């Protein structure tokens, strides 16, 4: 069985306080949180307050999908005009992800916000590939993965095909 991945920069697993120990704190940002006071939980071991606003840190899987969307967008641009921009090879994808993960507490919901993660992702992409347009990265950050659309008359995958006349 594979060992669980140790998060870089976090020397312990956060222990969330109970409902009774939660504290009333002012918002971390008035743009993100509209209420004057919010009950927030904190880690009993280190005292870091969990981010409960809309600017919560996303797990590493979310950012892997963002980098994959950047790679797909670059491949589309490369097919459209091959001389304009190069594709993003798998080695560069790994380097970008490694650079993101080397940041202490990158996927820690207590120590990081999504806006800080976005800044780190932009820096990681532009440190490996400075020629990638900022618009492609921002589109990948904003755009969720679209589901595959089927044609109107296409049969569903679960349909069982039978021979004519068979019962």
Image: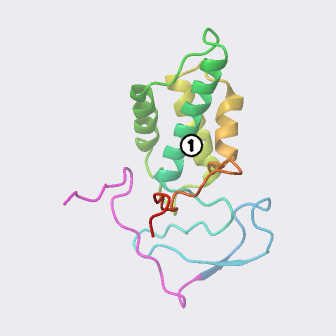
Q: Label 1: how many residues lie within 10 Å, few (<14), some (14-19) or many (20+)?
A: many
The reply, left or right, for residue 16 in relation to residue 58 is left
Q: Position of residue 34 (x, y in %)?
A: 80, 69
The residues colored magenta run 1-22
The verdict on residue 10 being magenta is yes
Query: Which SS class for mark 1?
Result: helix
Magenta: main secondary structure equals: loop
The verdict on residue 110 being magenta is no
Name the residue at the front extreme: 165
Name the image colouring: rainbow
The reply, left or right, for residue 136 in relation to residue 162 is right
Task: Say if 95 sits above or below 151 in the image.
Answer: above
Image quadrant where residue 53 sits: bottom right
Image quadrant where one finds the C terminus: bottom left
Name the residue at the top extreme: 83
Q: Position of residue 18 (x, y in %)?
A: 49, 86
Residue at the image point whose x is 62% and y is 48% from the top? 148
Residue at the image point whose x is 47% and y is 52% from the top? 61
**Camera-nearest residue between 165 and 52:** 165
According to the image, label 1 marks what residue? 66
């Amino acid at each position: 069985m594979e060992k669980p991945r140790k998060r870089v920069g976090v020397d312990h697993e956060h222990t969330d306080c109970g409902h009774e120990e939660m504290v009333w704190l002012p918002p971390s940002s008035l743009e993100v949180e509209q209420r004057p006071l919010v009950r927030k939980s904190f880690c009993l071991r280190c005292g870091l307050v969990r981010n409960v606003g809309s600017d919560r840190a996303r797990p590493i899987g979310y950012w892997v999908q963002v980098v994959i969307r950047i790679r797909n967008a670059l491949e589309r641009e490369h097919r459209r005009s091959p001389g304009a921009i190069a594709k993003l090879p798998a080695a560069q994808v790994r380097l970008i992800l490694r650079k993101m993960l080397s940041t202490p507490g990158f996927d820690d919901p207590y120590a990081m916000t999504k806006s800080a993660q976005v800044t780190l992702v932009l820096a990681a992409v532009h440190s490996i590939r400075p020629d990638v347009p900022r618009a492609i990265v921002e589109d990948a950050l904003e755009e969720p993965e679209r589901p595959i659309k089927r044609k109107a008359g296409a049969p569903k995958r679960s349909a069982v095909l039978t021979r004519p006349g068979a019962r």
